Image: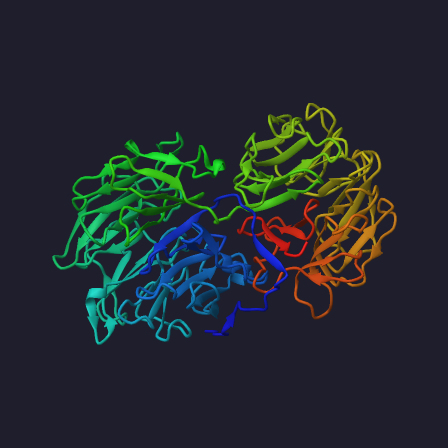
Amino acid sequence: MISDGSDNSGAVNTGWTYGQVAVGGGGFVTGVFSTCEEGVFYARTDVGGAYRWDDSTKQWRSLNYWVSEDDVGLMGISAIAVDPSNAAKVYLLAGTSYFSGGKTCILISDNYGESFTAVEVTDLIKNHGNGMGRGNGERLAIDPNNPDILYAGGNTGGIIRSTDGGHTWKPVTGFPITATTNQNGVNIIVFDPTSEKDGTTQRIYASVSQSKDNIYVSEDAGETWSLLPNTQNAMPQRIKLDSKGNLYVTYGDTEGPWGMSSGSVYKYDIAAGTAENIAPASTPFSDIAIDPNDEQKMVLTTACTWQQQPNGAFGDIIYTTTDGGKNWTNILTNATMSNNDMGWIDGYAFHWCSSLALNPFDTDEIMVTSGNGIFACDNIWDEKPELYFNSKGIEETVPMDMITLEDYPLVSAALDYDGFVHDDIYTPATRHGGQIGSVTSITVAPQNRDYWAKVGGSDSEQLLTYTIDGGKTWNKITNSPEAGKVYHSGKVAFNADGSRLIWSPENAYSAYYTEDFGKTWTKCEGIIGKSIYVIGDSISPDHVYAYGNDKVYVSSDGGKSFEKVATDLFLMEDRLCVSPTEEGTFYLPAGAGLYKTTDYGATFTKYEGVKVCDGVSLGKAKNDGDPYVIYIYGTVSDNSTKGIYMSEDDGATWTRVNDDAHRFGGLGNGDWICGDLNVYGRVYMSTVGLGICYCDKTEK
């Protein structure tokens, strides 16, 4: 076990402000939690870190801006535990199997998540915040009678225990399960506070993610374990206790968050040794919340059900009971539903509802998690409950592309949600029309800005659409570039005037162009490779540039044919950046440096001050006549920290833009930065799950 004591309290760059471009929700919030302090709630996400509710601004605040590129896996939060008597003391169980070498850490904060100490436990357990079963929980728990004692369950590795507030950990050797076939492992740990002895809780429940022999109990503070009688042949989703020690377990036939078709809710009377199914239906159920002032009153949510909700969309059901589960009311029958001024959510249901939080200071109020954010209700017990979207500040979209043009809104592309148009980065966005789901690339013709195209799809469906009226109406291109083949995703680009659309699919080793919006296609000569990044010159319709497979290509016939250039450079696959005003000028992030050409790629000049360049973009100059600001993601000396840097003098000098407290986990899936061509000192970056993050110079 490694306890490195690392934290995120690095120096702050006081000349800048940082944040997330407002979308207003998006992404799977896997847990939401009330605390002992009024107005303090926490939430966790699968790829976007954790959040704390800011009651003064009525929005959520990210707690994980500090995560570095190397530790980006810590954006996957498997569990949250909050000290029952101190809401400032919060722990996160963090790790993602396919990032950061599977690194798993316990993150410890005693200041509401303003800073964390990271304790690595990878050699003991491994967790996967974005795996199946990620909505189960919680697999991290604090002993309510002794907050120095914590237990954590792994997707693999069984259970570990700390007796010093999370700073050192050892295996719980008496627990019999260290892994499950679905790799979801130990998914729930619950302490029974009524079983205190000598200042320590004796009775502990632990669930494993399998369809039988799945709930274990210890009566001696974790030393020995036995199966709980009457457990069901289904997978536990969440476990709650009432003040009498009764156990409530929600079940589904799989671990979720999808693929479930049946389930139940069992009340275990531990003293009597009985078990009773109190579920209102045989559907899967995810979480149950008990009113601490009246334990006959409970709120219950389903998982993987598809009933029509008040806004017309289909998703999960919320039930209430006032008689301990003898009778249930489906609140959707009489509820209303508001987008809460986040219009993009219209037509979307709350679904994958894995977690509920009942406000202990006002039990009329609940929050429920969803695959697209958090929904809330402030009058859950009324005859006509009023549901509303409550995800302001939780920006968990995965941005894949962004376009900035002078005197034009920001246009972005994202996985799951198509993308957005922003006139103001602080106001929840307008979502694209012609929605196709996950968009990997979007293009706007710089000299004919009504022409846009975007691409997504899958092996079974080609999804390539275009608009010629600036996004008001969209048209699908259904004709494949190759008869009988289904191409999808990849990169698209218009040439400067929009007369030609070039597409390099994800699953084709060629690029194609069309001059009639897909009625006919022709293979581009000279390009071999998948998802080649293509971009048109901003001025010349005849010139198109491409980058991929460690090669740079230039076309002088509008994308019909390409020739390799810069063949002597060591290159990596990144986005080219074209000058908005200088024909033939583009910038090349070559991994081991930054290069510029002013003659259509015939020759390149290296910026000697740049050591590593994984991304480059241009932004608005401070004064008229000054060169565009160059932004890079990389390093500018042998000992500089990797991050975003800017140059206002064409690369002669560089200044760090972000700081160690604002690293955002690196460039993520989209792998880009994007300078704002309308606001001096503002630059955006893609992330793995924090949406579009921005850095904004305070002195303009």
The image quarter containing residue 39 is bottom left
In this rendering, position of residue 274 left or right of residue 213: left
Q: 454 and 9: which one is in front?
A: 9
The image quarter containing residue 611 is bottom right
Say above or below: 473 vs 524: above
- What residue lies at 85% left-to-right and 44% top-to-bottom? 600
In this rendering, position of residue 220 left or right of residue 600: left
Q: 297 and 124: which one is in front?
A: 297
Query: Residue 346's x, y, as percent?
Result: 45, 34
The image quarter containing residue 337 is top left
Say above or below: 572 vs 485: below
In this rendering, position of residue 455 left or right of residue 310: right
Query: Residue 32's x, y, as percent?
Result: 37, 52
- What residue lies at 44% left-to-right and 60% top-to-bottom? 127
Query: Residue 398's x, y, as percent?
Result: 55, 47
Query: Residue 1's x, y, as percent?
Result: 45, 73
